[in-house]
Amino acid sequence: MKVRFHRWYNTILSTLLALLGFEACSSDNGEDYMEMYGVPYATYHLKGQVTDESGKPIEGIKTAVKYVYKGVSGKTETWGIDSVMTDANGQYMVTTFDIHQDTKLIVEDVDGEANGGKYRSDTLSIDRSRAIKTADGKGTWDEGTFDIHIDNIKMKKDEADTPDA
């Protein structure tokens, strides 16, 4: 009876501790190791330049990193990660800590006529394989800092802005 009670007690206690995230950890050869919780991450700097079709830099273009995915309902949904505006040289740098397969760079003219006319928005896929490591990570989970250059983003004038011939 006493053995049966201890088995049930140990089973229930082990189950509760497992549900709370505690686990007994040891290897077969007797060496202890630490089990870590978390998700590896890296810092990505998406850099580039936005120009018009003639190559002139455009200031005031919003560059946004968004995760585009199919929702539960089957509709395409977006989750905004971060965004910045281009400077006077059309340069931008957006920092993010995660890039999925479906991460996109969305460029859009949010100031209308203010910087040389109204331009059509564009969506570009981010190719994570083009990332160049620029710094080592700090600690176990930090994989480091990477740059991804997305240059030659040429925005087209919005047809509604083009005068009729």
Image (cartoon, grey):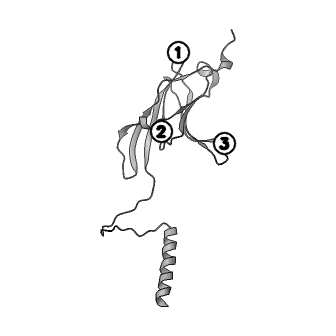
Q: Amino acid at mark 2?
A: Thr
Front label number (1 vs 2):
1
* Above or below: residue 70 compared with residue 38: above
Question: Which quadrant of the rendered structure holds the C terminus?
Answer: top right
Front label number (2 vs 3):
3
Front label number (1 vs 3):
3
Instruction: Residue 38: give x, y in percent of width and height.
Output: 45, 56
* Above or below: residue 115 compared with residue 80: above
Q: Is residue 32 left or right of residue 6?
A: left
Report the disc number at residue 14.
Answer: none
Q: Quadrant of residue 31?
A: bottom left
Q: Amino acid at mark 1?
A: Ser
Q: Is residue 76 left or right of residue 59?
A: right
Q: Nearest the camera: 96 or 14?
A: 14
Q: Nearest the camera: 15 or 138?
A: 15
Instruction: Residue 41: give x, y in percent of width and height.
Output: 44, 48
Check disc 2 and report the residue beneath it.
95
Q: Quadrant of residue 164?
A: top right
Proximity of marks 1 and 2: CB atoms separated by less than 8 Å = no
Q: Residues within 10 Å of mark 3 (few under 14, many from 20)?
A: few
Check disc 3 and report the residue beneath it.
75
- Secondary element at tag 1: loop
Instruction: Residue 29: give x, y in percent of width and height.
Output: 30, 68
- Secondary element at tag 3: loop
Q: Residues within 10 Å of mark 1 (few under 14, many from 20)?
A: few
Sooner in the amino-acid sequence: mark 1 or mark 3? 1
- Secondary element at tag 2: strand
Q: CA distance from mark 1 to mark 2?
A: 28 Å
Q: CA distance from mark 2 to mark 3?
A: 27 Å
Check disc 1 and report the residue beneath it.
54
Q: Residue at x 48, y 74 (%)?
A: 14
Instruction: Residue 135: give x, y in percent of width and height.
Output: 35, 41
